Amino acid sequence: MSATSPTTFAVPRVWRPLRLDTLVRIRWIAITGQLIGVLFVAFGLGYPLPLLPCLILIALSALVNVGLVVRLGAANRPSPRFAATQIAYDCLQLGGLLALTGGLQNPFALLLLAPVAVSATSLPRRVTFVIAALAIVIASAISVFHLPLPWDPAERIVFNRVYVIGIWVSIICGVVFISAYTMRVSRDARQIADALAATELALSRREQLSALDGMAAAAAHELGTPLSTIALAAKEMRAEVEPGSMLAEDVELIIAQAARCRAILGKLRNLGSDGGDPFAEVPLTDLLAEVARPHEGRGKAILFYHEAAAGPPPVFRRNVGLLYGLGNLIENAAEFARETVNIDTSWDGEEITVTITDDGPGFPLEVIARLGEPYLTTRAREAQIAGAEQPGGLGLGIFIAKTLLERTGARLSFTNIAPSGHAQVRIVWPRAALANQ
């Protein structure tokens, strides 16, 4: 088996999670806080500070906000590069204010971490590295080049150089930690979101196919009656026309085409025969045989074993997620098996177990503990790049199967059985899960 799926799903490559409105709102909050802080220090505390340059920097941010909203609209989703440009501007504007008001001696120097956190949460890794490097450069510059910290002129305040260096080191460590940690968490969240979107796409496609099967069967049923009437009328006409005449040839053509239409309608009726009623309850053994049937023509033997169990086979309500999840695992096993796939079922009063084992090379040891995570593939990268026809490029197969089956109440485990090393998937449902379907 492999952590891949023979079905591929398109995932967007251009990711624009930030709306311009979000960046603008964050900047308005920063502008408000800066304005209140500067005015309070100047007029509330009466400390001397370069008020006009500070107000000019704050007004510049307000003009940037107004200009962006007027030109692009609040609903615009900027590209990562444009969003990074705005965040870089915020870093520079904050750095300018800090340089005018004491540099790293200003307790608000901690706010240099905010733009880095925003970038790490929502922008690509390279962009975040640039923003983090910019924050480090700004912190280093204002630690040396800055105006005095606004303070009471009657008192003299002196910061030890070691203390200032400590603040600089703490900000550098904060930038590095926040960017690395937040990027990792956000990356995991994005992977889960994208993979769940692919899961929903897989379910949607399966539901569409089921709906088409139902529509085809309904159309075949509705067309059957008028077609039978046409065939009957044509046969009655054949008995009344002279053999060998042109009219007789036309009647024979009508009868032949009616028979052909009947055969086509028969095929349409059988399109959904494998899927059956999507709301029907079926025994587990029949359900497994149904989802395995499409994969029996690959030259691999799919063998079923039922252990001596208490009572009749458990009954499951058929649904798209259950069918797709089981079918995905069986398809994966059939693809990587050398000759045989074994499907073992057992049940008792407490739980129901399905075990799928193939005689292939088994799961790679380096990924077996992480099976079920999205975008985890055991295929060689060269094979993925070889062409669009190469299956399983996204590594979503087992993730989708595991997610869908867990929604039905199942627990999944992946192992390589000793001593053969063959891959094995074990699916266990508590009996209580059947009552909740």
Image (cartoon, helix red, strand yellow):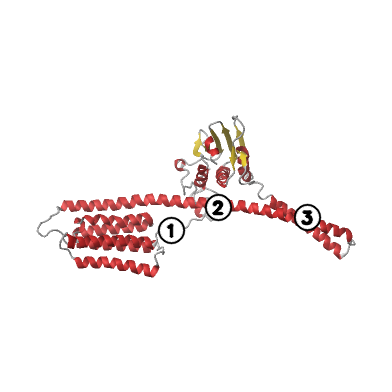
**Alpha carbon distance from label 2 to label 3:** 36 Å
Q: Are marks 1 and 3 in contact (CB under 8 Å)?
A: no
Residue 26, picture quadrant: bottom left
First in sequence: mark 2 vs mark 1: 1
Looking at this view, name the residue that lies furthest to the front.
44
**Alpha carbon distance from label 1 to label 3:** 56 Å
Residue on which disc 1 sits: 15
Numbered label attached to residue 228: 3
- For the residue labelled by badge 3, is the local secondary structure a helix, a strand or a loop? helix
Q: Quadrant of the C terminus?
A: top right
The front one of 75 and 275 is 75
The residue type indicated by label 1 comes to Trp
367 relative to 314 in the view: left or right:
left
Q: Position of residue 244 (x, y in %)?
A: 89, 62
Q: Position of residue 265 (x, y in %)?
A: 72, 54
The front one of 185 and 319 is 319
The residue type indicated by label 3 comes to Ser
130 relative to 283 in the view: left or right:
left
**Alpha carbon distance from label 2 to label 1:** 22 Å
First in sequence: mark 2 vs mark 3: 2
Q: Is residue 52 above or below residue 416?
A: below
Residue 237, picture quadrant: bottom right
* Crowdedness near tag 3: few (<14), some (14–19) or many (≥20) residues, C-alpha within 10 Å: some
First in sequence: mark 1 vs mark 3: 1
For the question of whether residue 430 can be seen, the reply is no
The residue type indicated by label 2 comes to Ser
Residue that appears at 36% across and 52% down: 183
Q: Position of residue 155 (x, y in %)?
A: 10, 57
Residue that appears at 62% across and 32% down: 312
